Image (spheres, coloured by chain):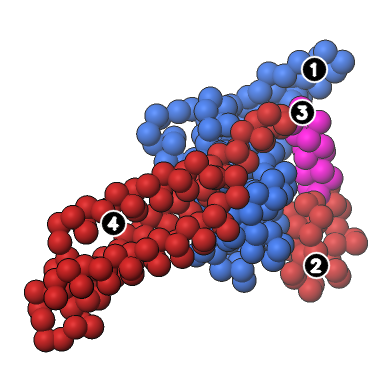
Chain colours: A red, B blue
Amino acid sequence: MGCERFSAARVQTAFGETPDDPSWAEHSPDCYHCASEIGDMDDLRRLYEAAPRRTLNRRSKSRIVAALKRDARSRRLRGAAVAAIFLLGATLAMPGTRSQPAPLAAIPSATAIDKSVVDVRERIGNLEKDLESPKPCLDSALEDLSRQIRLLAWETDDENM
Amino acid sequence: MNDLIQGLKAGDGRAFEQLVQEFGDRVHRYVARLAGVEGAEDLTQEVFLRVYRSIGSFEPSGGLAPWIFTIATHLSVDQLRKRKAVPEGPIRPNHSGDPIEARELRETLFEAIARLPEDQRRVFHLREEAGLSFREIAQVLRCPPGTALWRMHAAMTRLRKALKAHLEK
């Protein structure tokens, strides 16, 4: 018979796939052993498929989608917060490079730092409130924030001069 | 499928809905079989969260379904390790319309599936519950397609023997 080497092809046939082995096409039509094993596998699969199948109900699916949306929003917020903090840091460091030589001018006053931290916090708070349309809201808020911090850095620069 | 991936990367709500619609039931059935029915819904949610969070590292050449079920397999195995849960064994559904012989035969089949060696059971469920092709199963299990086919053949041989023994009783 030489059927042993066709075990993979029998499985593929029983599961509706086309066997990779080209010699299977010659062997299979006349082989009772292979046909009988494929028939047994078919029966077994039918028996398995006849059992009730577990499904997620609509509520469970909605719960998963809601969790995904929540996760996406909080990732955007985290991204925005990191960007804002980065922007704040970068802008505060900027005056030093603009007004050379004055290393002390790079250090803004404590009030200026406090003011900008409060501003960043306030902006993040606003973003949290405005989650319905996070993308445009984040973009405009970040732009606004960057403009304000830049102004703040300018003021700080003037104060230090 | 590309639109779905782009949508997921952009965090688009419609993409989330499509993802859950397309894969929700299959992932749920698969993790229930691997890690047990208890907590299967939470585990399903965790799979989708993990899919979304790591979509940036997804290689489109590999196909989305094998990638999702690789994540599902890892999380199910972790879950099993954590709570030493028993994978879903024989189901005892209400077969009120079935003749008693069919019901008993089906219970024998599910008991035999629960007793399969882990590697064979995983191939069986990836095919029957996740609906993956043998090539995709090989991707999930990181083995050659021939190995996946061999494991399925071994599983089928055991299951056929169990059913025959039941019928001969």
Looking at the rendered structure, the kind of residue marked 2 is Trp
Mark 2 and mark 4: span between their CA atoms?
Answer: 75 Å
* Residue A83 percent coordinates (x, y): 38, 62
Q: Nearer the viewer, mark 3 or mark 4?
A: 4
The answer to whether marks 3 and 1 sit on the same chain is no
Q: Is residue A147 found inside the magenta-colored segment of the image?
A: no
Q: Residues within 10 Å of mark 3 (few under 14, many from 20)?
A: some
Residue B159 visible, this orientation:
no
Mark 3 and mark 1: span between their CA atoms?
Answer: 8 Å
* Residue A39 percent coordinates (x, y): 84, 45
- Identify the chain of the residue marked 4, using the numbered disc in the image: A
Looking at the rendered structure, the kind of residue marked 4 is Ser
Looking at the rendered structure, the kind of residue marked 1 is His
Q: In the rendered structure, which segment of residues is drawn in magenta?
A: A37-54
Disc 1 to disc 2: CB gap under 8 Å: no
The answer to whether marks 3 and 4 sit on the same chain is yes
* Residue B55 percent coordinates (x, y): 54, 59
Circle 3: element type: loop
- Identify the chain of the residue marked 1, using the numbered disc in the image: B
Q: Nearer the viewer, mark 2 or mark 4?
A: 4
Q: Quadrant of the C terminus of chain A?
A: bottom left
The answer to whether marks 2 and 4 sit on the same chain is yes
The residue wearing badge 4 is A116
Circle 2: element type: helix
- Identify the chain of the residue marked 2, using the numbered disc in the image: A
Q: Residues within 10 Å of mark 1 (few under 14, many from 20)?
A: few
Quarter location, residue A18: bottom right
Residue A51: mark in rendering: 3
The residue wearing badge 2 is A24
Mark 3 and mark 4: span between their CA atoms?
Answer: 63 Å
The residue wearing badge 1 is B95
